[in-house]
Image: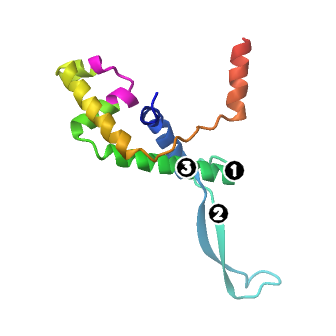
Amino acid sequence: MSKVEELLKRYLPYKHAVNVYERHKPIPSAGIANYSGMPGGSGAPERFFALVGKPADMGYTSDKDYLDYQKYKTAVIEIEGALDTLTEEQLSVIRLKWMQDITLQQISKRKHCGVTTVKKHHRLAMGRLTDALRFTKLVEIETHEKARECDLYATVI
C-alpha cells in the first residue's frame, strides 16, 4: 500500500484523536485572588494562572501525548490541504473509496455512472494527492498497554 493510501485510510482516526484531545485538554485560566480576608494575606489582589480541566476530562496528559497530538494535527492539516486540491467529483470518489471502504464498482453504481469514469476520477485524484502529500510523514498510532492486554487475552481464549 502506498503512503498516500495509508494516509487516506488513517485520516479519520487521526482526525478523531485530534478532536478528542482538543475537546478534553486542560485550558489555562487566569484569575485574581484577594487575600485581604485571610490570615497573613497581603491584602493586595494577586494574579494567578491555573490549568482548568474541561468537563469529561480525559485525565492526565503527558508531554508525549502533546507531542503525539501535534504530529496528528500536522498530518490532519496536511491531508485536508491535499484534499482541497481535488475537484468535487475526485473528492467524492476518494472519500467513498478510502474513508468508507467502498469499491470503485460500488461507487459507479451509487453515482449512476460508468466504472471507467470513476476509475479516471480516482486515478487523477491519486496523482494530485501523491504530489500534494509528498513530504507528509505517516504518524504511527500508539498502542497502549490496555489495548495490548485485551489483544493478548483475546488470543489466549
- Give the magenta range: 96-106
Which comes sooner in the sequence, label 2 or label 3? 2
Amino acid of disc 1: Tyr
Q: Is residue 67 left or right of residue 79?
A: right
Amino acid of disc 2: Leu
Q: Residue at x 42, y 32 (%)?
A: 5
Residue lying at the far top of the rendered structure: 157
Q: Main secondary structure of the magenta part?
A: helix
Mark 1: few/some/many CA within 10 Å (<14, 14-19, 20+): few
Q: Is residue 65 left or right of residue 84?
A: right
Residue 150 colored in magenta in the image: no
Residue under label 2, please give it: 51
Please tell me in which quadrant of the rendered image residue 54 appears: bottom right
Q: Residue at x 38, y 29 (%)?
A: 98
Residue lying at the far left of the rendered structure: 113
Q: Secondary structure at mark 2?
A: strand
Residue 103 colored in magenta in the image: yes
Residue under label 1, please give it: 60
Give 56 or 130, whichever is nearer the viewer.
130
Q: In the image, is residue 139 above or below residue 117?
A: below
Residue under label 3, please give it: 71
Amino acid of disc 3: Lys
Q: In the image, is residue 55 above or below residue 107?
A: below
